[in-house]
């Protein structure tokens, strides 16, 4: 009988799941302090901030520089400083990488190259900025325009939504409850400015310190550090989930006690599928802080979302080759009025879309026929990667551009000059044996993406209607496309406000 009881206990013990943290190897952790570990979406690079390292841009007196370690097989390589393009002699940190791996949010004393920037960063007034990855190098950071941006603290952190429209920051401002509070700003497409930071309120913020760590790719699950709650140590990690689309209502924060310890847990990021965390902590064996990883229990992972990724290929002589020119994406969801635009230049794409929705992808590139496809993420119960390679068909050389007409700013009607040009084009077309006429509308860069898309379509439709009446042809002979502001041909805005007319000949 005693033996049976013992076997039963052993049986149930085998089902206990123990979540333990693993300290990353010495090649990464040999220098401390190291903070803000950010894993790249493909898992091949780990970015982190080293304090007072001899090889920082400002040497041992340089508070923070951004470093990167690249994976070779299963081994992490020797970390490299990102260089003076990113790292200045003052504090610099990389805080968030977008799902495509091409853009990152950084913080530092960056000067703007945009004369219309609201405020310029100085040594005593650093700022959040965006940088783009070109090959293995990151571009000069361009400061974000944030209305009424200031913070009284030298400490900082931030994260973003996957589309870049929402910015969550740790700041110390006049209405802060503690030393650092979480604030949120929203992007205005027309002014290209983030709104005045709003305090996220008492459910999130305490009389202590709140450091934002990571907004998961579901755009709902937020991880942050706090010392203003009952904690195991100084700063502990917490999770909260967004309850509605105002971004101001959040669930009661839950401690990540399977990670928290008597050490500081002050920053965290997740891999692209949201099941593994990279974070700062410490342990009794090493007796010092460092960067760790751990598998997350299911209940502490993000809500389901779909990662759709793949190659962009061009069919050439029966061989599919990577397209290494700008390819423009428009992604929309008609139920939520969600519209997102992006540009891919290296032949690979990756996007994250929320769960339980159908998304339509529209792809176009100069010299290729447009391409579209749809995908539904409703069947997924966890973050899921779906691979979809896109093969673009080159436009036939015999599809000929026969004319271009221009428009005034924000106008879709044909003026007298445009009408005269179209009459001459129609005279030339009477002897042409074409299959169809293609009208492609464009705009300048002023205005939102969606407004310009609709404006370009109206221009194309009005032009097509005028030509069809002159030639007395039906709708079956007409094709219409709108490109919005995605395909400029000149720095002169007037030349971009145009409709191009193509002949599509019979096969």
Image (cartoon, rainbow, N blue to C red):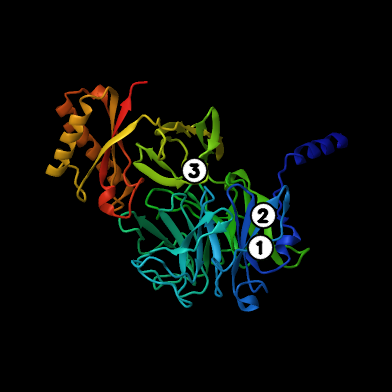
Identify which residue, 253 or 190, lies in the foreground.
190
Q: How far apart are marks 1 and 2 (CA)?
A: 9 Å
Q: Earlier in the sequence, mark 1 or mark 2?
A: 2
Few, some or many C-alpha atoms within 10 Å of disc 3 (few <14, some 14-19, many ≥20)?
A: some
In x, y percent, where is residue 220?
47, 48
Q: Quadrant of the N terminus?
A: top right
Few, some or many C-alpha atoms within 10 Å of disc 1 (few <14, some 14-19, many ≥20)?
A: few
In x, y percent, where is residue 450?
31, 45
Q: Nearer the viewer, mark 3 or mark 2?
A: 2
Q: Nearer the viewer, mark 3 or mark 1?
A: 1
Instruction: Say above or below: 506 vs 464.
Output: above
Q: Are marks 1 and 2 in contact (CB under 8 Å)?
A: yes
Say if residue 157 shows up in the picture: no
Q: How far apart are marks 3 and 2 (CA)?
A: 23 Å
Q: Quadrant of the C terminus?
A: top left
Q: Distance between the residues labelled 3 and 1?
A: 28 Å
| Quarter holding residue 38 | bottom right
| Quarter holding residue 419 | top left
Q: Name the residue under label 3.
A: 351
418 displayed left or right of 489: left
Identify which residue, 46 or 244, lies in the foreground.
46
360 displayed left or right of 352: left
Q: Earlier in the sequence, mark 3 or mark 1?
A: 1
Q: Mark 1 points at which residue?
A: 80
Circle on res. 18: none
Q: Mark 2 points at which residue?
A: 70
502 displayed left or right of 330: left
């Amino acid at each position: 009988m005693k033996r049976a009881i013992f076997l039963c206990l052993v049986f149930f013990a085998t089902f206990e799941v123990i979540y333990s943290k693993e300290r990353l190897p010495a090649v990464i952790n040999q220098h401390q302090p190291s903070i803000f570990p950010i894993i790249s979406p493909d898992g091949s690079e780990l970015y982190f901030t080293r304090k007072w390292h001899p090889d920082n841009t400002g040497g041992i007196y340089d508070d923070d520089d951004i470093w990167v370690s690249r994976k070779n097989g299963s081994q992490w390589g020797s970390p490299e400083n990102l260089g003076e393009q990113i790292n200045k002699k003052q504090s610099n940190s990389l805080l968030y990488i977008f799902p495509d791996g091409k853009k990152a949010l950084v913080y530092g004393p960056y000067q703007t190259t945009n004369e219309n920037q609201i405020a310029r960063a100085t040594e005593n007034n650093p700022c959040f900025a965006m940088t783009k990855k070109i090959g293995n190098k990151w571009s000069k950071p361009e400061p974000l325009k944030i209305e009424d941006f200031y913070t009284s603290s030298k400490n900082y952190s931030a994260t973003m939504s996957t589309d870049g429209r929402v910015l969550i920051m740790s700041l110390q401002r006049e209405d802060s409850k503690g030393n650092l509070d979480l604030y949120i700003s929203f992007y205005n497409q027309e002014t290209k400015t983030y709104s005045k930071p709003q305090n996220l309120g008492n459910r999130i913020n305490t009389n202590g310190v709140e450091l934002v760590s990571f907004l998961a790719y579901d755009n709902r699950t937020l991880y942050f550090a706090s010392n203003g709650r009952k904690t195991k140590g100084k700063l502990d990690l917490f999770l909260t989930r967004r309850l509605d689309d105002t971004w101001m209502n959040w669930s009661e924060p839950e401690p990540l006690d399977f990670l928290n310890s008597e050490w500081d847990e002050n920053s965290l990021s997740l891999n692209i599928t949201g099941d593994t965390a990279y974070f700062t902590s410490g342990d009794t064996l090493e007796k010092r802080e460092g960067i760790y990883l751990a598998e997350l229990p299911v209940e502490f992972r993000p809500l389901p979302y779909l990662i759709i990724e793949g190659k962009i290929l061009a069919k050439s002589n029966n061989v599919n080759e990577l397209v290494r020119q700008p390819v423009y994406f428009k992604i929309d969801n008609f139920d939520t009025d969600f519209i997102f635009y992006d540009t891919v230049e290296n032949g690979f794409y990756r996007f994250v879309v929320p769960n339980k929705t159908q998304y339509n992808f529209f792809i176009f590139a100069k010299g290729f026929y447009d391409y579209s496809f749809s995908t539904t993420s409703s069947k997924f119960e966890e973050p899921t990667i779906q691979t979809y390679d896109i093969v673009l068909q080159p436009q036939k050389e015999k599809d000929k551009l026969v004319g271009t007409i221009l428009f005034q700013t924000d106008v879709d009607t044909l003026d007298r000059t445009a009408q005269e040009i179209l009459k001459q084009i129609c005279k030339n077309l009477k002897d042409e044996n074409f299959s169809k006429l293609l009208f492609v509308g464009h705009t300048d860069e002023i205005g939102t993406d969606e407004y310009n898309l609709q404006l370009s379509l109206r221009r194309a439709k009005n032009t097509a209607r005028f030509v069809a009446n002159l030639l007395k042809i039906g709708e079956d002979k007409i094709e219409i496309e709108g490109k919005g502001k995605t395909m400029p041909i000149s720095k002169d805005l007037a030349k971009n406000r145009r409709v191009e007319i193509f002949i599509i000949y019979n096969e």
